[in-house]
Image (cartoon, rainbow, N blue to C red):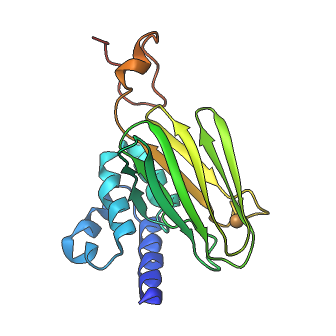
Amino acid sequence: MRSWRLAGALGLSAALLVLSACEYAGLFRPSVLGQVDPEMATLMNELPNLDEPNEAIIGRIYATGGASRAELGSDGIMRDRIRIPKDEYLWYPAVIIMPRGGTLELDITNEDHRLHAIFAASNGDRQIMSLPAATRGVIRVQLDQPGYYWFGCPVENHLGRGMLGLVLVKGEVPPEARLDRPPQPQAGNRRPPRAHH
Ligand SMILES: [Cu+2]
């Protein structure tokens, strides 16, 4: 079962590599989606909602690990789990989707027989947590603004071998964070800032 899923994921990411951003639309057919695991289906469903450069980048770089939507707890904290599978140099899932800005708690299990670590953006700062072989740890990051924030493994060349992940924070800036901020320029070629009410 597991090797079948892995083969499917690898085949899909290879396919995404050679297709342009819009050509992979054919892969969204329900018959195809039914064959991939939930993390991959989540990523494929999320891609069309993104603007074009980000869609292409995320589809290309992060496709092997799939995506997951963090769950909002009753305490207001968003939570998700990530696995580091054995011998794959991969975060699984590699894309974490937050429904809005706030605190994200990641429960990470290192199933590998080597040391890994997570190095993650947190409101302009960074959080780091070491994950020795066969251990599990919880890290919290604060991401108040919608956008894309990377995380990676800083051990040796693990980042270059594929241990790159991304937190996608959705939604508008909450009103309480807007009060004393003038309209902010948006990164890249996204729509101009809206007038505040
Ligand atoms: Cu690593």
Q: Residue furthest right?
A: 156
Q: Is residue 184 above or below residue 71?
A: above
| Viewer-nearest residue: 136 or 95 | 136
> Which quarter of the image is occupied by the N terminus?
bottom left
Q: Residue furthest left?
A: 30
Q: Is residue 176 left or right of residue 138?
A: left
Quadrant of the rendered image containing residue 177 = top left
Q: Is residue 99 left or right of residue 59?
A: left
> Which quarter of the image is occupied by the C terminus?
top left
Q: Position of residue 181 (x, y in %)?
A: 46, 12
Residue displayed at 48% across by 52% down: 57
| Viewer-nearest residue: 194 or 112 | 112
Image quadrant, ligand 1:
bottom right
Quadrant of the rendered image containing residue 176 = top left
Q: Position of residue 138 (x, y in %)?
A: 59, 56
Residue displayed at 68% across by 60% down: 159
Residue displayed at 54% across by 69% down: 83
Residue displayed at 61% across by 42% down: 121
Q: Position of residue 32 (x, y in %)?
A: 26, 76
Q: Is residue 66 left or right of residue 87?
A: left
Q: Position of residue 133 (x, y in %)?
A: 72, 74
| Numbered-mark total | 0
Q: Residue furthest front?
A: 75
